[in-house]
Amino acid sequence: MPAPAQPALLRLACLINALNHRLGVFCAWLTVPMVLVTAVVVVLRYGFDTGAIAAQESVMYLHALVFMGAAAWALQRNAHVRVDIFYQKMSPRRRAVVDLLGTLLFLLPVCLFLAYNSWSYVTESWQVLEKSREAGGLPLVYLQKTIILVLVASLILQGVAEVIRNAYVMLGLVDAEVQHG
């Protein structure tokens, strides 16, 4: 007998989880070039007494993408910081209530606040194709600032997935042990 079809909202949550998983894994792999470029910068600076502004800035860009691009993936994997003195002793349904309220009252409002306040900051940078102020720096400051919107969009999407999953857990429609995707 075939398994029953998954509800549309759970399919949406799984799609969001898959998207943020791919983004997170991609960003996690950026730590490799970030470390390598950092090593090159250090060798150039202390071994050859020369600077490499573009390389230093590329480390900064990679660092921003690693942390902001993978934030939603960390949320999905429950890898964010949590003081769980009480949370760890709660039942799965109570945890779902706490997570649902946290998402609705804190995560989504903060993300919307960030989106509202960073939109003009990013769009103004794109309008002038903002470049580094440093001689020899990267001409891609507008792309670096766009990472803020990647953070906001991926966290909002993950927040939606979390709301869906936690609502289903609260209502007893899915097992709380079922992973996020």
Image (tube, rainbow, N blue to C red):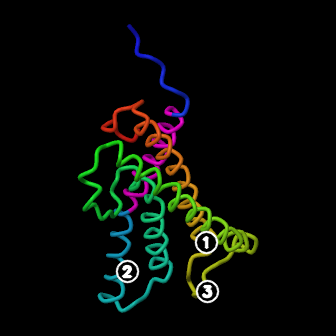
- Circle 2: residue type: Val
- Circle 1: residue type: Leu
Over which residues does the magenta segment extend?
10-30
Considering the image in quadrants, where does the C terminus appear? top left
The residue positioned 66% from the left and 72% from the top of the image is: 117
Task: Say whether marks 3 and 1 touch (CB < 8 Å).
Answer: no
Q: CA distance from mark 1 to mark 2?
A: 19 Å
Quadrant housing residue 143: bottom right
Residue 17 drawn at (x, y percent): 46, 43
Query: In the image, is residue 74 above or below residue 148?
Result: above
- Give the class, few, some or many, for how many residues have Cα within 10 Å of label 1's Cα (few <14, many ≥20): some
Sequence-wise, the earlier of marks 2 and 3 is: 2
Give the residue number, with chain letter if any, for mark 3.
Answer: 133
**Label 3 element class:** loop
Which of discs 1 and 2 lies nearer the camera? The answer is 1
- Circle 3: residue type: Arg
Residue 12 drawn at (x, y percent): 54, 36
Report whether 71 appears left or right of 77.
right
Mainly helix, strand or loop, the magenta region?
helix
The residue positioned 35% from the left and 49% from the top of the image is: 95
Q: Outermost residue toward the bottom?
A: 49
Give the residue number, with chain letter if any, for mark 2.
Answer: 41
Q: CA distance from mark 3 to mark 1?
A: 11 Å
**Label 1 element class:** loop
Q: Using the image as rendered, state which of residue 68 and residue 177 is in the foreground.
A: 177
Residue 45 drawn at (x, y percent): 36, 88
- Give the class, few, some or many, for how many residues have Cα within 10 Å of label 2's Cα (few <14, many ≥20): many
The residue positioned 64% from the left and 78% from the top of the image is: 131
Give the residue number, with chain letter if any, for mark 1.
Answer: 140
Quadrant housing residue 166: top left
